[in-house]
Image: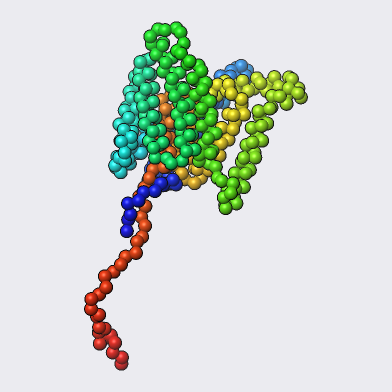
Amino acid sequence: MVGNEVVEGGGRGLEEHGLLFEYTVKCLLLASFLELVLYRLVSRLGMHLSKVAEKHESVRLTFKFLSSAGFTLLNFTSILLFLALFLVMHNSMKAGFQGRLEALVIPLVSLLLALTVVFLIFPPAMLGSIAYNLLSLAVILTLVARYVAVSPSWPRRMMVLCYLGGLLGWLYYQTLSTGYGLLGMVASPPLVHEINRAGEALMVLASILVFWAYGSTPVWTKNRRQRHRIIAFALGGGTIFVGLLFLDYFLTLYDSRLAESARKAGEGIGWIFQMGMGYTFYLPFAFYVTGLLCWAYTVLKLVTMGRLAGYGLGLMFMAGYALQLSHLTLMVVFGLMLILLDKRKAPVAWSEPVTEPVMAQTVRPSPVLTEQT
């Protein structure tokens, strides 16, 4: 018998959504990672090492090949994103909408995809960029509101809300700066730089809270392997955090020149990540490394388990803080949809005792069956 009770289905696997969707999401995660490394980071590194590339032809050709490969991966990632979003919307429409907020998601995402295609053909001006940012904000707010409504876990709510705060900081900076430029105003928008930095801090905090929301396991768990893993990760991560936090102080005590070289290397890394992902690295470097470790551990754990949340979190944070390209915005939207699917509720079937009616009369056995020879 099937009951009407509904419980939270927190562990739905990727393979339950169809073979095409499964391999599309897996290829998308891999292509997004390679695009991040080869296009958004390595190409910026080539710009930073332009003097070295001028002296050595092999270095120039290497960076040129990696940049072209990264640009090809960007187009491939965009195609996979369109396919994945189409599949998830098709499956949602086929299954039927569940709630008002979810019914709003499909039209908004469809409009965002249509606007993306239009802007790929006809590059947008300032007004088009503002409209695209506002529509993206509407889609993200709807997805986050739906997630907070269906998720009973406060750590996961806090993580998603911190992530939303980070995106709001960037969208505020981008939209108001573009709006002031459209109006011909030279002055900076109010608190634009402060809100931008606050958004970056919230994004880093969200990458750390990912571990608490999805990757952590209680120390008192009966699973020894999980307990040993969480203890080893906590000790290793804590040691790296403290070491990086006081690295400059220790290097200064040891050798001031070495400390100065480390600072210049940190500035170079910060420049590359600022151009590629939007992080300015104004916070201590230890916080960024801690967020990277917490995010990487959680994503690897969930992906090996086949959880949709692992793929969603991977895409959300690989998009970076500055959503300067349209496919980065689509990565955030699709990532939010995946973690929302991972937490969707589903009816549960259970067995009930079935009582058979008592026969009013006793049936006598047939003499043919009872006769012995």
The picture places residue 126, in percent across and down from the top left corner, at 38, 15
Please say which color scheme the image uses: rainbow
x and y percentages locating residue 17 in the rendered image = 38, 45
Residue reaching furthest to the bottom: 373
The residue that appears at 33% across and 36% down in the rendered structure is 102
In the displayed structure image, the side of residue 155 where residue 262 appears, left or right: right
Give residue 76's position: percent from left, percent from top: 43, 32
Q: Nearer the viewer, residue 150 or 79?
A: 150
- Location of residue 97 by image quarter: top left
Q: Say which of 158 and 38 sits in front.
A: 158
Question: In the rendered picture of this protein, how many numbered marks are placed on residues?
Answer: 0
Is the residue 275 above or below the residue 296 in the image? Answer: above
Instruction: Report the side of 89 relative to 10 (left or right).
Output: left
Residue 51: x and y, percent?
61, 16
Report the quarter where the C terminus lies: bottom left
Where on the picture, by quarter, is residue 350?
A: bottom left
Q: Residue furthest left?
A: 361
Q: Name the image quarter holding the N terminus.
A: bottom left
Q: Is residue 91 visible?
A: yes
**50 in relation to 366, above or below:** above
Identity of the residue drawn at 46% across and 11% down = 188
Asked if residue 361 is positioned above or below residue 205 in the image, the reply reads: below
Examine the rendered structure and indicate whether residue 18 appears above or below residue 39: below
Residue found at the very far right of the displayed protein: 254
Q: Residue at x 53, y 32 (%)?
A: 207
Depth check, front residue: 98 or 178: 98
Q: Is residue 106 visible?
A: no
At 51% from the left and 45% from the top, the residue drawn is: 304
